[in-house]
Amino acid sequence: MAEFTSNKEVDLEAALQRAKEEMNKFCVRSRITKSKDEQREFWVIRRESFNLLRNKIKDKHTAPFIDDIIINPHHLNTFLPQLRKIIDKYQQYLIYTVAAHIGDGNFHIIPLMNLENPQTRAIIPKLADEVYALVNEFNGSITAEHNDGLVRSHYLRDMYGDAVVDLFKQTKQIFDPQNIFNPGKKVNASKAFALSHIKQK
C-alpha cells in the first residue's frame, strides 16, 4: 500500500497510474482507492492481517518462521522471483501471504500450515535454510524488526560470522552469567532446541 499526495489532482492521477503500471511488471493485481472510506478499509485490513490469518483459517496455523527478512530494495526485481521459486517448491504443504514495508525491502512472509502433520513440520527447517541462505546471498538480514528469538538465533553465525557471535556471547556473559534470561536465544542456540518449540496443534 502506498499513499500519494499532490496539490494538483491531475498530477496525482498521473502518479497513481504510473505506480499501477510499474506494479503490473510484478504480475500482481493492484487497485487505486477512490475515497477516504475505501482507503481506511484497506489500512484496517493491513493492520489486522495477521490476526485475520491466525483466527479465521480453521484447518491451518500461522507459522511465522521466515517472517522478518530484509534486503536492499534495489535488488527486489532479482530477489523476489528467486524467493517465490523457493517457497513454491513446498506448495503441497503450505499456502503463504506476504506483507512488506516495500520501501526498505522488509518482508513478513507468513506460511499457513497444518502443523499436526509431521511431514509438514519437517519442511520448516528445510525452507528456512533455503530462504535465509538466499537472504545472505543478497547481503540482507534475516531479522529486520522482530528480533531473532528461538526461530532465527541458530542462523546468526551464518549471517554475522564467528567474531560477531562471540561478541554476543561475551555480552551475555557480562549481563547474565548464569544464563537465566531467555536461554537458547541469541547465543548458545541450536536448531534442535528451536524445532522442539513448534506447536503441533
Image (tube, helix red, strand yellow):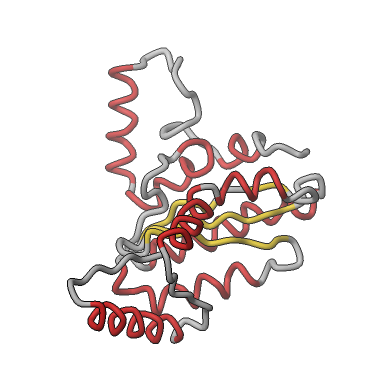
Q: In which quarter of the image is residue 180?
A: top left
Rendered position, 50 above or below 166: below
Rendered position, 50 above or below 83: above
Residue 16: x and y in percent read 34, 79
Rendered position, 66 above or below 30: above
Left or right: 19, with 34 as reference point:
left
Left or right: 89, with 16 as reference point:
right
Rendered position, 147 above or below 50: above
The residue sitting at the left extreme is 7
Locate the N terminus by quadrant.
bottom left
In this figure, what is the number of numbered marks?
0
Residue 3: x and y in percent read 32, 65
Q: Residue at x 39, y 46 (%)?
A: 157
Residue 137: x and y in percent read 38, 67
Q: Residue at x 20, y 77 (%)?
A: 8
Locate the C terminus by quadrant.
top right
Q: Which residue is drawn at 42% across and 32% down?
A: 187
**Front residue (pair 108, 2):** 2
Residue 49: x and y in percent read 56, 51
Left or right: 23, with 10 as reference point:
right
Left or right: 156, with 113 as reference point:
left
